[in-house]
Amino acid sequence: MPFRTLTLIGASALTLSAAVIPAAGAAAAAAPQRAALATTTLYYDDSQAAEFKSAVIAGAQVWNANVQNVRLVEAAPGTTAQVRIVAFDGWPQSTLGPIRPGGRGTVWFGREAVDEGYNTTRIAAHELGHILGLPDAKPGPCSSLMSGSTGGVSCTNATPNASERAAVEANYGGSAAIAAHPLVGGIVTDTP
């Protein structure tokens, strides 16, 4: 420590202060690094999302604004992504996660739901919720993102409620969460 040249009379008090101040400063400086290390980043490929690309980006932004333990980031062209988004003509469906780095999942963004009038951002956020490990909560109110189509065609709520946010945070809450929640891998189809 740089404070070792202090006189003996005040050395114990000053050494204590010197030891506490750098340790507290180091802990404060390390906190953002620990938080950054605790965040799981999942990359998604929306190159096959067709007309739903902007809805997918909005759905990912919803999750990024509401949870801290996981981030959904658009993959650079030509790079590997854990989540693939594909537009198709059926009902929306997804791989049930939680998807982990190195894992793979797919969101099939179904035009059938859009043709019936369901909100595209809500569909995207809901399907990404499956990727993050949330099952359907049907039937359910519009205030529940995972209620999906049972929220009704007029429901535009794309924001997860408190319990949905907490479940995703728990799914990505560190190595214990990874061991406790292995990839389920089944496909969830969101029909009314």
Image: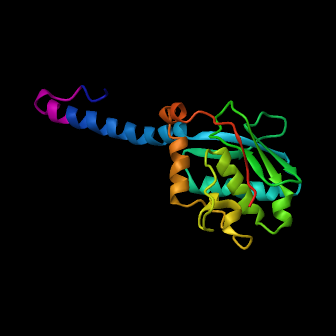
Say if 161 sits above or below 28 in the image.
below
Q: Nearer the viewer, residue 111 or 24?
A: 111
Span highlighted in magenta in the image = 5-14
For the C terminus, give its image quadrant: bottom right
Say if 50 sits above or below 82 in the image.
below
Residue 165, image quadrant:
bottom right
At which x and y percent is residue 36?
A: 54, 40
Say if 40 sits above or below 156 in the image.
above
Q: Nearer the viewer, residue 178 or 187?
A: 187
Q: Is residue 119 magenta?
A: no
- Residue at x 13% of width, y 27% of height: 8
Taking the image as shown, residue 77 lies to the left or right of residue 15, namely: right
Taking the image as shown, residue 27 lies to the left or right of residue 4, namely: right
At which x and y percent is residue 138?
A: 63, 59
Magenta segment main secondary structure: helix
- Residue at x 77% of width, y 33% of height: 80
At which x and y percent is residue 149?
A: 71, 63
For the N terminus, give its image quadrant: top left
